[in-house]
Image (cartoon, rainbow, N blue to C red):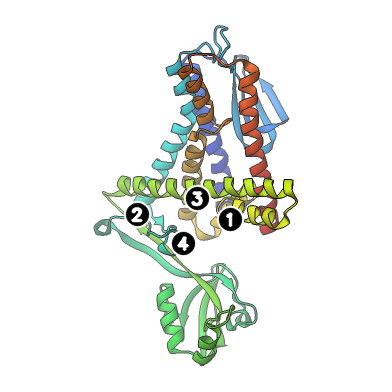
Amino acid sequence: MQLLLSILGIVLFVGLVLIHEYGHFRSARRHGVVVEEFGLGFPPRAWARRLKSGMKLSLNWLPLGGFVKLKGEHDADRQPGSFGAASLSAKTRILLAGVTANLLAGLILLTLLALIGMPKLITNEWSGEEQFSIASDTKIVRQEVRVAAVQAGSPAAQAGLDSRDVIVSLNERPVGDTRQLQTVAGQLAGQTIRLVYKHRDQSLNKLVTLRSAAEVKSSLRTDQPKGYLGIEPVDLEVRRHTWSAPIVALGFTKQLAWLTLKGIGHALAGLGSTIAGLVTGNQQAREAGQAEATAQVGGPVAIANILWGSGELGIYFVLMIIAIISLTLALINALPVPALDGGRLAVILGARALKRRLNPSTEDLIHGAGMAVLLALVALITIVDVKRF
């Protein structure tokens, strides 16, 4: 089942890229702009086929998204059927159509999840606020404690626990959340207990001796604090809503947008520090920049790893990750960064404000610089992701 859900997640991710590009394609055709190529991935090209309409379909080797190539993409083009010859309102709709498509797809998925079961991913511990919900219309349908990490040499390690295992009970005392786990483990400190847990849908039980209260207390004064069981637990919770489902979807989208913007800010600041470190030869600045640039964002490798891992958690989590990626694609592409949809629109609007048309070479230079920064960031994140995963 995990394999099927993981494959489904990857297929749905490809679908998000196609939805984004189809938005551009549909809007361009509606406004009379000729679409020359519809591509999945970025060149070099792996496969291509020309349709009777003259449009080329292509598959490309770099898995960084997709593209729709329009006739006459420069703002100065004036040939019939070219993007440049379209009105400003038409250009705006075409450029923002992909963003709109991903935004709608994400909101629809989140609303569906709120109705059938939405995982709680935003917590006060790491974001400073709890995931948005309406208490009077919230029902918890699944709650369990997962193992995020196991300390080497700990009672948990000796019992054979692994990351993503589910803690069920200690000495037949059920454990529903991390707070309850800490309370029960503290009451049983130093004792040999029967630990029941799930490993890949298989229920196991082991005898394990918990650390004593004295050992745990003394470790808190060191740089390596220990727990009674020796794990880093995380709460896994799925909630269900009824009439408030659309409101919950919108509330979560607002939270995600803010967290995404914060992550992008850290990534760009980290990239700047990395470049400065390379130029000046300051290795400490370079390493610090790499850490900041990649701490809160992930590239293609991270996305594939997350989608693969979410398959083990169930369909709710696969769909949740897809919804988050869809909304993130919408937000990032709307940013006024050259080479992105929002950046292209910003350049066009800037030229209109100055009452002049950009010549093609200047336009290419602006978007080429933006693409260079984006590719550098993707390369940096991917290198770190490979080391991480």
Dot 4 amino acid type: Trp
> Is disc 3 placed on a helix, strand or loop?
helix
Q: Which residue bears the numbered disc 3?
A: 321
Can you tell which of label 2 and label 4 is closer to the viewer? Answer: 4
Label 3 vs 4, first from the N-terminus: 4
Disc 2, SS: loop
Tag 2: amino acid: Phe
Task: Compare marks 3 and 2 and give the one earlier in the sequence.
Answer: 2
Q: Which mark is residue 126?
A: 4
Q: Which amino acid does the dot numbered 1 rest on?
A: Ala
Residue 330 appearing in the image: yes
Up-down relation of residue 226 to residue 163 (above or below) = below
Residue at 49% of width from left, 22% of height from top?
350
Q: Is residue 331 above or below residue 385?
A: above
Identify the secondary structure beneath mark 1. Answer: loop
In this rendered view, identify the residue nearer to me: 333 or 199.
333
What distance separates the C-alpha of mark 1 from that of mark 4?
Answer: 13 Å
Along the polypeptide, which appears first: circle 2 or circle 1?
Answer: 2
